[in-house]
Amino acid sequence: MDDAGMSLQATMTAMGQAAREGASALRVATPAHRTAALLAMAAAIREDAELILAANAKDLDKAGAGGLTAPMVERLMLNPERLEGVAAGVEAVAAIPDPLGVETARWTRPNGLDIARVRTPIGVIAMIYESRPNVTADAAALCVRSGNAVILRGGSECIHSNLALHAAIARGLKTAGISTNAVQIVRTPDRDAVGAILGGLGRTIDLIIPRGGKNLVARVQQEARVAVLGHLEGLNHVFVHAGADPKKAVDVVLNAKMRRVSVCGSAETLLVDRAAAKTLLPPIADALIKAGCELRGDGLARAIEPDMKPAIEADWTTEYLAPIISVAVVDGVEGAAAHIAAYGSGHTDAIITEDEAAAERFVTLVDSAIVLVNASTQFADGGEFGFGAEIGIATDKLHARGPVGAEQLTTFKYVVRGTGQTRP
C-alpha cells in the first residue's frame, strides 16, 4: 500500500476509534441532553441555510456537467423549502420518545430473579449513501436519538452539500455539549474510504447501513465484514383488484407513481385483475398518460390499451425512478402475489379493493416489509409512520424491517436483578 493509501486507512481507523468515544458519550447522556442536542442541530441547520444552499448549488452545477440522470438530480436538489423540511425533520426526531432504557418485557422467575429486557444502543453505525443530502441530517438525528455514534459517507455527487450540513450538525452538537465524535463525516470522495468502512475500521463499527442503488447495496452486502442492515431497491407494486372502487383506484395509482417518481416508495409496476381489467384499466391508464407517465404493458394490458409500449422481461425488475410504469394483467389475488414474489424486492406493495376478504388474503400472501390496503405506496416513509424520520427502508427480515427509525436502531440487553441467588 502506498503512503496515500496508508494515510487514508489511518484516518479512517482514527474515525472509528473516535466514534467509539462518541458512542460512549451518547450512551450515558440523558434523554433531555440528547433532545437538546437535536434541537441545537436543527437550529444550526436553519442558521447555516445560505451556506448549505450555496454548497448544494455547487453539487448541482457538477451534476449538470457530469450528466447525472434527472431522478438523481431531483434527489440531490435542495431549496429553501426542502432545507426547512430537513431542519423540521430533525425537530420531529427530537419530539419522539427516547427509546433508550425502555423495558420491552419484565418478569420474575420462581427463584425470585427479576429479569428485564431493556433497549440499548447498537454502538457505532456507518451509513453509506448516495445522492440525497437530507439523509445526512436524518441519519445524524436518528443516531443521536438512539444513542449511536455514526460515521457518514455520502456520494461524491453531493459532497459539498453533505459537508455543509455536517458542519451545522457538528456545531449544534458542540453547542449542546455533546462530543462531535458522535457524528462524523468522511470528507474525501476516495472510494477506498468505503473499502475501509466495509473492513470494520479495526472492529470499531457495529453495523453498516447502505442506502442507494442496487450496485452499492450489493457491494456492501458482499464485502462487509460486519453486520449489514439491507435497504434494497423499491420494486413496488400496486394491485387493482376486481373489487376496487374505480375512482379510488385512479387516485391511489396516480399518487403512488407520480407524486415523486424519484423516491424508493414510488410504484414501478401496476397489476390489474383480469376479472375487471377492461373496466378498471382504461381510466387509470388515461390518468397516468395525462400526467406524463409512460406505460409498458404485457400482451393482455396492451390488448386493452394498445397505446402502451410492449413490456420486456427487464421491465418487471427495473426500478425506474422516472415517470415510467410497467403494467400486467393477473388472475386475482393469487396471480398478483405470484407476480410480486417473482419480481418484487420485498419493499412495499399495495392492493386496492373494497373486498375485505381479498385484502386480507393479499396481506397474508405478500411477504414485503410494507403491505398497504387502499393507500399509496408513497406512504413508505418513516416520517409518515410517525418515526420522525428514517434511515432507510429495511428489506431484510432480521433485526429491523420497513422504515428504520430511532427505535429500530436499538438492540436490547437483559438486566437480571437478584437478592443473592446461587444456581444449584
Image: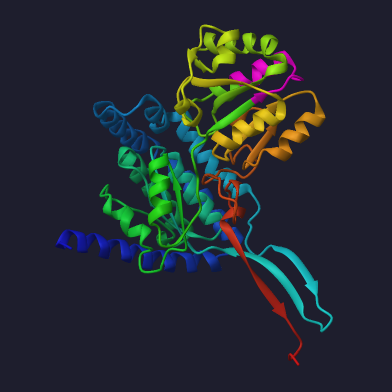
Q: Is residue 317 above or below residue 205?
A: above
In the rendered image, residue 86, in percent from the top left (x then y), is placed at: 49, 38
- On the picture, is 189 further left or further right than 167? left
Within the image, what quadrant is residue 16 found in?
bottom left
Q: Residue at x 56, y 63 (%)?
A: 121
Region in magenta:
239-254
Q: Assess whether residue 279 is covered by the magenta stretch.
A: no
Q: Residue at x 62, y 41 (%)?
A: 368
- On the picture, is 20 further left or further right than 98? left
Q: Residue at x 55, y 15 (%)?
A: 299
Within the image, what quadrant is residue 104 found in?
bottom right
In the rendered image, residue 159, in percent from the top left (x then y), is placed at: 31, 42
- On the picture, is 405 further left or further right than 72? right
Which image quarter is the N terminus in? bottom left
In the rendered image, residue 18, in percent from the top left (x then y), is placed at: 38, 66
- On the picture, is 198 further left or further right than 391? left
Q: Residue at x 52, y 56 (%)?
A: 144
Within the image, what quadrant is residue 53 found in?
top left
Q: Assess whether residue 242 is covered by the magenta stretch.
A: yes
Q: Is residue 317 above or below residue 388?
A: above
Which image quarter is the C terminus in? bottom right
Q: Is residue 170 visible?
A: no
